[in-house]
Image (spheres, rainbow, N blue to C red):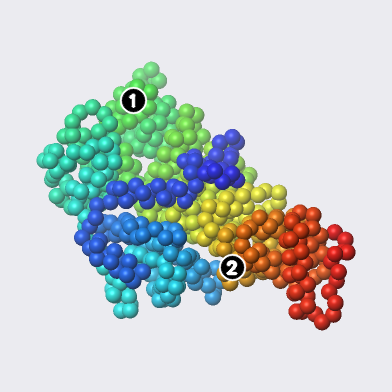
Amino acid sequence: MSDRNGDTYNVYVGTEPLLRTPPSTPRRVADDQLARLQQQFARPDGMGAAYDVLAGEHTVILHGEAGSGRSSAARVLLCELPQGRGTYHELTPEEPEVPSGQWLSLDLVGEQDRMLLDLTSVDERTWRKVHDELSGFRHEVLAQGAFLALVLPRPFEEQLGPQFTQFRRKIGRPDAWEAVNRHLWLAGVHESVRDLAPPALRTYLDSGPPLRDVGRLAERIGVAARGPGDFASWCEAALAAQKDRTRDVAEAIQGLRKGRQRALFLTAAMLEGAPAEAVHRATNLLVDEAGSTHDDRPLLEHKGLSLRLETVGAELDSDARVHFTEPGVAEAARHRFWTDLPDVREPLNNWLVKALRLRGLDESDLAELVARFTDLCVSTDDTERLTKLVERWTRDSAHRATEVRAAAHLLKRGLENERSGGEFRSRIYAWSTGRPSKHLRDVLVEVCAKVMSVHHPEPALVRLHHLARNESHPSVVARRALLDHVSQDVRLQRRLLARLATAQAERHHRADADLFLDLTGLPDGFLLTAPPREWLTSCWRMAFDLLTPNRWARCTTRWLVTADRTKGEALVEAALSILVDASDMRYPVLSRIYADARRTVSPDLASHLLQSINTAQRARFTHRAPDLEESPS
């Protein structure tokens, strides 16, 4: 569990965490990404008008051409608003867990929050549900003084209700030259790109490529700028890497007549950057899986690996690792084999399972291999193949540390892909609410805590909550990750508290009550508003009803000690009233609370607690209250 100094929670297999991530909280990672976006962002046409609507109406709805940077524009607009008490966060509409629930929960709106609702990738059903709830959600936005930027999905732009058209603004395409300039400025290249640009760069940018590709090109120029040469040579190298190699690869495959030659080409593409020894062994595995034949000549008559790599356009570097001589070839080859030879998918799937066990592949090699295979499956919407791999790699009966780690990398890649992220979040929800194996549970905790939490903190909370409440004793992996996740954001604490207090299924009440006892801090002002106060009372009542005094007593003591240190009469009064109300005037509960208070808090607070108890008893009963001063502990 985090020690609250910025380190993130880790799940270990052996001595290594499943996923290596920067030593920062998800909130810090998201903020850093947002800060970098603001520095790189080139303002498009319509940005000023959109800001005026957002600032004046607290809502703006953006639309525009695909690839014009609408989502980035929405993020920057929200961050350009004057900073208030609220936070920036992104909303993720999901089907509610109960029939009466909402796709856009009003609990997600905090005072002066700045919220992004990016609907560019949602399906029609999600769009309709969100649209139906939008008026009520905007009412809460206004009530909280918050701000909402919504990005319309292009297929459903014309379905936007007339009551929202006044908030709709079009975002144009930013100047590509300015976008490149801003990227390169961050890389230390401060000259004007337009003045230095060679003809090839001018031709490329004038062709109107998607902004995502422009950003990728600028990043490649920045990388090249760290080496020798001038600006023209840097651009030449970046444009070469940007070139579409599909036709070149198709011709190369056509020229390879033997199955083992094609197996080497595909293996080198899947394992580019890996050691030559591993590529050689992996090629033999693929030859077997694909039903091809090995070279049946005597071993000493075989061509050497270096020469065979030359036939597919690859070579060995100084560290004996395999690389293609032309950039972009590996990616194009992978996709060409996958799409043009669909019958190779199943053998490649089986090959991947075996390749993970090859000696010589380090963790980064394995992570790259799994990520590349995941990208192939996502490109043809074959996510079912990926979920089967995750389940296979995390079966307790077939546990291997490498495979469990591969499952984590697979889910990380799937979640981060815009095309497949929603489907993987749904799949993880299904696993989390079921009975996952121990190793699958560990993987789910890791990807929820480290990956999903960055841009989808509420869905991560929901899944971690299900994993925690179904966790078998004595394991506390999911619980610790959940508590670490919500400790970083009062809004998430509020969200979890609401879930604990309003859970519909009674079978979860005991686990939720036990979990609540680890949330018994007192955020400033948290108790002074009606919903949290009611939720806290409900949760304490569950704890008193379902758990033993030995479990809840130390938590009531911690609650009272915290209240004793709190400045503010209203907050202290609320803390005491919540405990008294939750007790339902049960003598054993009140007796234990008061006896513990006399030993651990100031006499003033203990006296105040006794007064609260007596006042509540007089209001409820007409007979004399028990004398708690003489009650045993």
In which image quadrant can residue 576 be found? bottom right
Q: Is residue 358 above or below residue 622?
A: above
Return the x and y of residue 216 as percentages of the image width and height: 28, 44
Q: Is residue 65 left or right of residue 529?
A: left
Disc 1 element: strand
Residue at the (33%, 79%) spot, across then down = 163
Residue at the (44%, 47%) spot, across then down = 29
Q: Amino acid at mark 2?
A: Leu
Q: In the displayed image of the protein, which residue is found farthest to the bottom?
A: 622
Disc 2 element: helix
Foreground tag (2 vs 1): 2
Q: Is residue 109 above or below residue 622?
A: above
In which image quadrant can residue 249 be found? top left
For the residue pair 350 and 630, the one nearer the viewer reads as 630
Residue at the (61%, 62%) spot, across then down = 568
Task: Say whether residue 451 is visible.
Answer: no
Return the x and y of residue 592 as percentages of the image width and height: 81, 61
Tag on residue 140?
A: none
Tag on residue 528?
A: 2
Task: Say whether residue 447 is visible.
Answer: yes
- The residue singled out by tag 1 in the image is 316
Q: CA distance from mark 2 to mark 1?
A: 67 Å
Q: In the displayed image of the protein, which residue is found farthest to the top?
A: 300
Q: Amino acid at mark 1?
A: Leu
For the residue pair 172 and 217, the one nearer the viewer reads as 172
For the residue pair 597 and 356, the one nearer the viewer reads as 597
Chain-order first, disc 2 or disc 1? 1
Disc 1 packing (10 Å; few <14; some 14–19; many ≥20): some
